[in-house]
Amino acid sequence: MAKWVRLCGLSEAPAAGQVAEAEVEGVAVCLANVNGELSALDNFCPHRQGPLGQGWLEGDAVVCPWHSWTFNVKTGLAEYPVHERVDVFPLRVEGDHVLVDIE
């Protein structure tokens, strides 16, 4: 069952080409804006728990600021190393609210 919770206001979301950190109910989230489309993924890189929300975007991938591992913002799959991944949370915008399903 989905558990939709408010992550932030739409005006608080990162601008196109940017990422940001957010937290909801104890879950750390990396919020990415690729060409105006928001995505939410686990904020912690599986390598050394680097904060992805402090990284940057290259195309449709967020880059970990600590060791440059990259993760597709839609699938969570790493570009390198290929078998790594982070969780991606379903996201929707309702009015001025950005909601995520953290279940």
Image (tube, grey):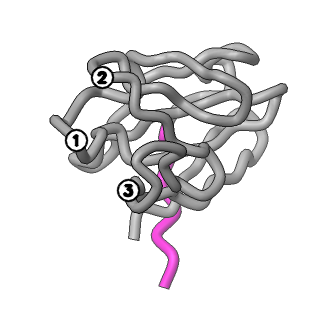
3 and 1 marks in contact (CB < 8 Å): yes
Q: Is residue 32 left or right of residue 22?
A: right
Image quarter where the C terminus lies is bottom left
Q: Which residue is mark 1?
A: 47
C-alpha distance separating marks 2 and 1: 8 Å
Q: Which labelled disc corresponds to residue 67?
A: 2
Report which residue position mark 3 lands on. 84
* Residue 73 versus residue 92 in the image, above or below: above
Report the front residue among 15 and 94: 15
Q: CA distance from mark 3 to mark 2?
A: 14 Å
**Earlier along the polypeptide chain: callout 2 or callout 1?**
1
Q: Kindly report the distance in space between the C-alpha atoms of the residues bearing marks 3 and 1.
A: 9 Å
Of callouts 3 and 2, the N-terminal one:
2
Name the image quarter holding residue 35.
top right
Q: Residue 77: image x %, image y %?
A: 52, 55
Q: Are marks 2 and 1 in contact (CB under 8 Å)?
A: yes
Q: Amino acid at mark 3?
A: Glu
**N-terminal label among 3 and 1:** 1
Q: In the image, is 79 to the left or to the right of 86?
A: right
Q: With respect to residue 23, does 5 lie above or below?
A: below
- Under mark 1, the amino acid is His
Magenta span includes 78:
no
Residue at (59% x, 61% y) in the render: 90
Please name the amino acid that badge 2 sits on: His
User: What are the residue bounds of the magenta stretch?
Assistant: 1-7
Element carrying mark 1: loop
Estimate how packed mark 3 is, as few (under 14), some (14 to 19) or many (20 or more) residues with alpha carbons within 10 Å.
some
